[in-house]
Amino acid sequence: MADMYIKNFDDRSKKPGRMIPFFIVVAILIGAGWWWLGRSDESEISETKLQDEVIQPSASVYVPKTQSSKPAVSTTQVSSQTAPQASIDARRMFNRAQEKVSAGDLKEASALLEKVINETRDLSLRNNALRVQGRVNVQLFFSEVPTLEKTSYVVQPGDSLDRIARKNKTTVDLIRKLNQIEGNLIYPGQRLMVPSAPFVVKVDKTDRQLELVIGGKRFKRYSVGVGRHGKTPIGIFHTVVHQKEPDWTPPTGGIVPFGDPRNVLGTRWMSFQDDARPDLKGFGIHGTSDRESIGGETSNGCIRMLNEDVEEVFLFLPRGTQVIINE
């Protein structure tokens, strides 16, 4: 019996391990309480922050101290309001220009159309203004109204129309039409109107447009056809051969006479070349009766114009006229 040990009751109640579950429960309750309090504070802070974001303006926006009762208009709203107004103003200006044409005030009409061309963003309106202005400029050029595009020349002893044309880098036919002369008869001391500067041809391959320019100013614009697959060369050229009712020599050889349906040159032909590139041959400006071929890549490299357009251009251009072709 000496080996048997019996614990007292007091010893069992003081066992350390029996208090652990109690402390765990207390710790869990305290932690849960702190978590709940923290969550409530965070919700209040988030709500306050949200209110501040709604009420306070952005730092990048200027708010004047004294505000008008009228709402502010954004830049986008201003643009949307001014753009239609600009379009309306341009159309009104175009209509006024047409009224000036009807009234015979061609100089004012041309000036108004120039403003429309320079200011409008409406491509259709701009094209219409260019078309009308070209017709007005031609009509004005052949009228008795003085313009910057023409000047007076006094006939000298020994002058002829051909000599005067060469002096002024123009054509005999243009001098005749400009001065309403029949035949070749002129006399010393006579005053004739001649172009004030040589005409220059500018071709834009991308837009398929040809412009007649005089004194650095656009005179008239024409729609043209250009070469397929970029065959029309670019650069600065000068015209060489000018022919009315031309025969056509196709690349395969032979001659196709004027009037033959196979002749693709129309009623006029003006070849152009660059002396620095003698390999570029066979290119020119010519007419066509095929209206569908204008405005596209339809030729074998030449500049193709409607017959009525090329006949008008032919009148203005003497041999040696500069031709500038750009992409």
Image: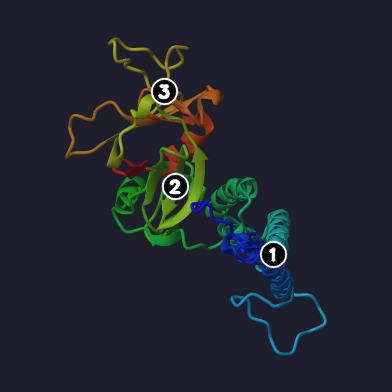
Residue 64, quarter of the rendered image: bottom right
- Give the mark, 3 or 2, whose residue is nearer the N terminus: 2
Report how far apart the C-alphas of labels 3 and 2 lie in the structure: 20 Å
The image shows residue 213 at horizontal and vertical percentages of 43, 51
Above or below 230: residue 180: below
Left or right: where 295 falls relative to 31? left
Q: Say which of marks 1 and 3 sits in front.
A: 1
In the displayed orientation, state which residue is furthest to the bottom.
66
The image shows residue 117 at horizontal and vertical percentages of 58, 55
Q: Secondary structure at mark 3?
A: loop
Quick one: label 1, few (<14), some, or many (20+) residues within 10 Å?
few
Tell me which amino acid carries mark 1: Ala
- Give the mark, 1 or 2, whose residue is nearer the N terminus: 1
Reading the image, the residue beneath label 1 is 32
Left or right: where 62 falls relative to 239? right
Residue 322 disc label: none
Tell me which amino acid carries mark 2: Leu
Foreground residue among 254 and 86: 86
Quick one: label 2, few (<14), some, or many (20+) residues within 10 Å?
many
Q: Secondary structure at mark 2?
A: strand
**Residues at discs 3 and 2 in contact (Cβ within 8 Å):** no
Q: Is residue 177 visible?
A: yes
In the displayed orientation, state which residue is furthest to the front.
1
Above or below 31: residue 291: above
Foreground residue among 220 and 279: 279
Reading the image, the residue beneath label 2 is 212
Quick one: label 3, few (<14), some, or many (20+) residues within 10 Å?
many
Report how far apart the C-alphas of labels 1 and 2 lie in the structure: 90 Å
Q: What residue lies at 68% left-to-right and 69% top-to-bottom?
A: 30
Reading the image, the residue beneath label 3 is 265
**Residues at discs 1 and 3 in contact (Cβ within 8 Å):** no
